[in-house]
Amino acid sequence: MGSVTSRRRRSDAGDADASGGKPVELIVVRHGETDWNLARRVQGSTDIELNDRGRAQAKLCAEALAKQLQGTPHTIWSSNLGRAAATASALAMALGSKAANGDGPISIPVRRDERLKEWDLGVLEGLQKEDAAKQHPEDWETFCKHWAAPSVPEEIASRVINGGESMLQVRTRAVACLDEVCREARDSASGVAIAVTH
């Protein structure tokens, strides 16, 4: 937790989609570290900024992607939360410098979209993980046991965290956004899409 990681995936296994569009390389990057990560506090949709280490992680991730990427994304998409947006800005600067033309670095915009924000964890947010588990065991179990599972029973996925949202709501909004990210990238020259999230 707290490290910047990226996952690369070619949409449609690298083949053209059913509509005849070209393949897209989707890179999903997790934001850098925050003080709440260090304190083992549940962040959820609370807007906590990167700490010094998180800013350094974002810069290192940006430099690594700038070296590895063949194309330059038209836009970098980001959660609307500051920790993700700061990471996205570091990526935009590094990739813009890499793609510099005779007039200097190019500007790669960062598009903030709330559909990419972290799961709204309601009553769990701000609590240390141990306290969250004790004070709200059902909500904690829904979050802790199932958040990264590829398949979750519908009764669990549709359960709303007290004061927050359900896993199904999160997945629905995030997938809708990533579909849009990929459609836009498919229409761009590079076919590269980057989304910075949680």
Image: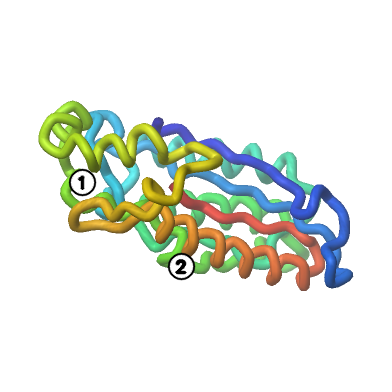
**Rendered image: mark on residue 125:** 1
**Rendered image: mark on residue 18:** none
**Residue 141: percent from the left, percent from the top?**
29, 35
Question: Residue at (59%, 61%) from the top-left corner?
Answer: 178
Identify which amino acid the numbered label 1 is placed on: Glu
**Number of dots carrying numbers:** 2
Gap in Å between the C-alphas at discs 2 and 1? 21 Å
**Residue 149: percent from the left, percent from the top?**
49, 37
Is residue 16 toward the left or the right of residue 53 in the image? right
Identify which amino acid the numbered label 2 is placed on: Asp
**Front residue of 102 and 56:** 56
Residue identifier under label 2: 113
**Residue 36: percent from the left, percent from the top?**
25, 37
In the picture, residue 120 is in which quadrant? bottom left
Mark 1 and mark 2 in contact (Cβ < 8 Å)?
A: no
For label 2, the crowd category at 10 Å Cα-Cα, with few meaning under 14, some 14 to 19 and many 20 or more, is some
Is residue 48 toward the left or the right of residue 196 in the image? left
Question: Residue at (79%, 54%) from the top-left corner?
Answer: 12
Question: Residue at (75%, 54%) from the top-left corner?
Answer: 11
- Foreground label between 2 and 1: 1
Q: Residue furthest left?
A: 135
> Relative to 96, is 65 above or below?
above
For label 1, the crowd category at 10 Å Cα-Cα, with few meaning under 14, some 14 to 19 and many 20 or more, is some
**Secondary element at image label 2:** loop
**Front residue of 193 and 124:** 124
**Residue 114: percent from the left, percent from the top?**
41, 66
**Secondary element at image label 1:** loop
